Amino acid sequence: MHKLLLTISLLLLLPLFQIAADNNDLDDEEPDAVFEIAATNYNFSEEEITVSEGDLIELVVYNSQGQHDLVIDEFNVDTGLIPTGGSVEVRFVADETGEFEYYCSVGSHRQAGMEGTLIVE
Ligand SMILES: [Cu+2]
């Protein structure tokens, strides 16, 4: 009886492990496209990025000056604060076509011009 309960418990937990494994797969895969974006006060070096639907995208965001991050709400992309003089890599699958805004969420940086358009086609 105990064995049966144990087996059922493990079966219930299995999907959690699979989700964790899927996330790791994203890190192991070769990205289909890599974009380097530099953040300064108050500008991103790329105002527009065009990618293909379904592609695994890697963004390498450099921060050369000030406090910045890069966020794309629709794809749950958020670099967190990027160290000044450093960079952060984020990956996501562009699994939806359309135009999406990316922006810096620090203070009023977005209003000051730190935004751009991600086009998935
Ligand atoms: Cu900023």
Image (tube, helix red, strand yellow):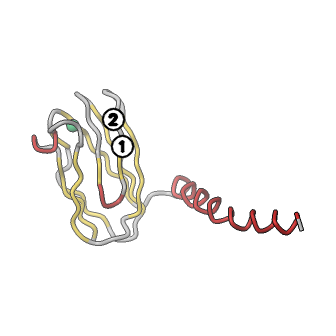
Identified at 23% across, 37% down, the residue is 106
Task: Give the x, y percent position of residue 117.
Answer: 19, 57
The mark tally for this picture is 2
Locate the N terminus and report the quarter of the image it occupies.
Answer: bottom right
The image quadrant in which ligand 1 is located: top left
Query: Is the residue marked by circle 1 packed among few (<14), some (14-19), or many (20+) residues within 10 Å?
Result: many
Between 105 and 7, the one lying in front of the other is 7
| SS class, disc 2 | loop
Q: Amino acid at mark 2?
A: Leu
Identified at 37% across, 53% down, the residue is 34
Disc ID at residue 81: 2
Q: What residue is disc 1 on?
A: 79
Q: Quadrant of residue 28?
A: bottom right
Q: Amino acid at mark 1?
A: Thr
Identified at 20% across, 44% down, the residue is 45
Q: Quadrant of residue 13?
A: bottom right
Query: Is the residue marked by circle 2 packed among few (<14), some (14-19), or many (20+) residues within 10 Å?
Result: some
Relative to 29, does residue 88 appear above or below in the rendering?
Answer: above
Q: Residue furthest left?
A: 112
Q: Quadrant of residue 19?
A: bottom right
Task: Give the x, y percent position of residue 58.
Answer: 39, 53
Task: Give the x, y percent position of residue 116.
Answer: 18, 52
Relative to 92, does residue 37 appear above or below in the rendering?
Answer: above
